[in-house]
Amino acid sequence: MDRHGNRQKHLNPNPIQRALLDKFHHKITALIQQTGVTCLLDAGCGEGFVLKQLQEADPSPAKMIGGDFSGDALLWGRAHLKHNAPLAQFDLHHLPFPANSFPLVICLEVLEHLPDSRVGLRELARVSAEYVLVSVPHEPFFRGANFLRGKHFRAWGNDPEHFHNYSGRSFRRMAGQVVDIVWHGYAFPWQIALCRKRN
């Protein structure tokens, strides 16, 4: 298994990490249910851990589509996770869907990996008909938690795959340039924003 990345994060047996992920998934599920949508796109779904979690929720959106840049992640998820959501390989900068295709587009723990997060967020908003739900690590707490447990120690806890380290304020400022933020909050060590597309 990789020493970092989505799969490692979700399969790590550490009970503290499991509890933090469960809290994060619970908050994401509650926000999605709050929107009342019956269809969503999970852009940057990785192996599909969140899709699986949502399908186990009651109630859950009736139709979910997932996609990721990594074909290996999609293949692993299809082989190991029990969910029936259609999956597609795509680049988040150029989503293969018309404008206003989904009432809700979610993108969790992805924007910090893009050289320009706003470019990705604009594309998420383009294919959304109403809502965009995004999350990124909450800094400096995410890096601090990594450092204290000896992860990425030489980089002071900074994940080598991250281009950005967003504080709550800097994340709201970045996202607010593209979408209207309805709610912003935290599920340590992550931050989440439920947003509306601008017309």
Image: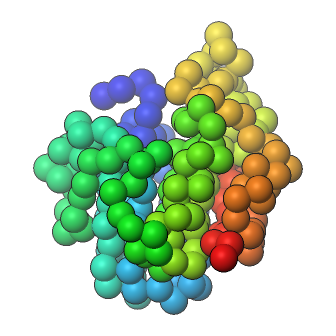
Vertical position of residue 38 compared to residue 31: above or below: below
Q: Is residue 29 above or below residue 19?
A: below
The quarter of the rendered structure image containing the C terminus is: bottom right
Can the viewer see residue 12? no
In depth, the one of 70 and 153 nearer the eye is: 70
Q: Residue at x 71, y 18 (%)?
A: 156
Q: Residue at left 82%, top 52%?
A: 173
Residue shown at 58%/85% (left/top)? 34
Q: Of all residues shown, which one is farthest toward the top?
A: 154
- Which quadrant holds residue 157? top right
Q: Position of residue 46 (x, y in %)?
A: 36, 47
Tell me if I can see residue 125 in this picture. yes
Q: How is the image coloured?
A: rainbow
The residue lying toward the viewer, choosing from 58 and 162, is 162
Q: How many marks?
A: 0
Vertical side of 173 occupied by 64: above or below? below
